[in-house]
Image (cartoon, helix red, strand yellow):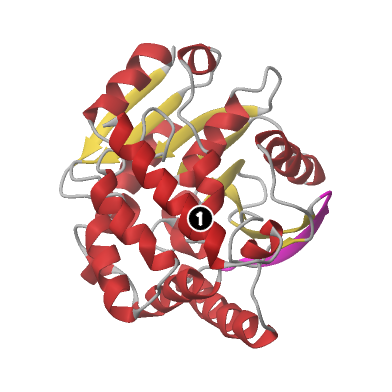
């Protein structure tokens, strides 16, 4: 499995290297103002799917501006949301009402992906990612806050939790990518990831079926934004730097952690949960039935209930 995964990574790396002759950091931004405007309009429409009051703010960091969407009671416990790859903060639309019942939510757009954050520096290293998020946390004076994170966001949340001193309380990892193990079914996911280089509506439909058991549940409005993210911005090369955490790194995490994966997830498997239980000293795990990698969309009520019960 490791050899197979390595071969696929090499192919993706070669394709991404040949895709553009521009400096690497430009892979994370839109090529034209028109592309950016089209995407931003789709983002704004998708964010309205939250269907609750929210505010948006840009926070200056050492690497550019971080776009943050805030919602929920100001006296609620602080909760940071970290989205999946190219999904942006709009992805939380099936979950946001439940998450904001007792929490003040800060949904942060990852700066190396198509969204409303704006990268003005070179690609971030793991250390840079820590600096980026800690600058945002410090801006809002967040202390003892919870994190709910999906896919690549789960990897980032785990990275944040490995810091010797952090202000995180509870963590929920929703099918975290490359966190406990390498991609479980690399053949299926590699076909989907090729959409990044050769985007089309037909391939996009197949991608959604790969990652979701109920792609029909995905809002047409959100689907459009997610497709444009794949079409316009080539952000996946940074995924090549994401490696599963070592036993020692996982053992260093003392936070209460809930790990959820779908029973047909192509990114994780029961092996992921076993490793979480073995090396995270204060963890709970659960498999969500009839759900794929997009478990927040496939089974929103089940996921919302599990997350809220754990956080409360």
- Residue 43 in percent (x, y) is at 55, 75
- Residue 192 in percent (x, y) is at 32, 60
Q: Is residue 169 left or right of residue 188?
A: right
Badge count:
1
* Residue at left offset 27%, top offset 38%: 184
Tell me if residue 56 is in the magenta stretch. yes
For this rendering, which residue is in front, 121 or 64?
121
Label 1: which residue? 236
For residue 82, above or below residue 3: below
Q: Is residue 192 left or right of residue 95?
A: left
Magenta stretch bounds: 53-62
The picture quadrant where one finds residue 185 is top left
For this rendering, which residue is in front, 65 or 17?
17
The picture quadrant where one finds residue 135 is top right
Say which quadrant the C terminus sits in.
top left
For this rendering, which residue is in front, 198 or 228?
198
């Amino acid at each position: 499995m490791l050899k197979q995964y390595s071969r696929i990574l090499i192919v993706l790396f070669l394709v991404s290297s040949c895709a553009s002759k521009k400096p690497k950091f430009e892979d994370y931004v839109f090529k034209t103002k028109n592309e950016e405007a089209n995407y931003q309009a789709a983002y704004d429409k998708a964010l309205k799917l939250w269907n609750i009051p929210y505010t948006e703010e840009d926070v200056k960091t050492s690497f550019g501006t971080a776009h943050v969407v805030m919602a929920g009671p100001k006296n609620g416990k602080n909760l940071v949301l970290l989205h999946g790859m190219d999904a942006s903060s709009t992805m939380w639309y099936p979950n946001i009402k439940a998450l904001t019942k007792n929490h003040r939510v800060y949904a942060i757009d990852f700066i190396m992906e198509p969204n409303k954050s704006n990268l003005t520096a070179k690609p971030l290293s793991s250390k840079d990612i820590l600096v980026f998020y800690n600058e945002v946390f410090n801006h809002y004076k967040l202390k003892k806050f919870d994190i709910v994170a999906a896919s690549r966001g789960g990897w980032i949340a785990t990275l944040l939790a490995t810091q010797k001193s952090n202000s995180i309380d509870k963590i929920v990892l929703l099918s975290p990518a490359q966190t406990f193990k390498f991609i479980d079914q690399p053949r299926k996911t590699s076909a989907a990831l090729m959409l990044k280089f050769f985007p089309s509506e037909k391939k996009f439909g197949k991608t959604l079926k790969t990652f979701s058991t109920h792609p029909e549940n995905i809002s047409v409005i959100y689907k459009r934004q997610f497709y444009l993210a794949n079409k316009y911005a080539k952000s996946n090369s940074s995924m090549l730097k994401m490696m599963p955490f070592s036993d020692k790194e996982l053992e260093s995490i003392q936070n209460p952690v809930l790990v959820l994966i779908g029973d047909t997830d192509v990114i994780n498997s029961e092996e992921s949960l076993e490793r979480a239980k073995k090396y995270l000293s204060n963890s709970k795990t659960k498999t969500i039935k009839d759900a794929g990698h997009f478990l927040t969309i496939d089974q929103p009520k089940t996921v919302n209930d599990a997350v809220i019960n754990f956080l409360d």
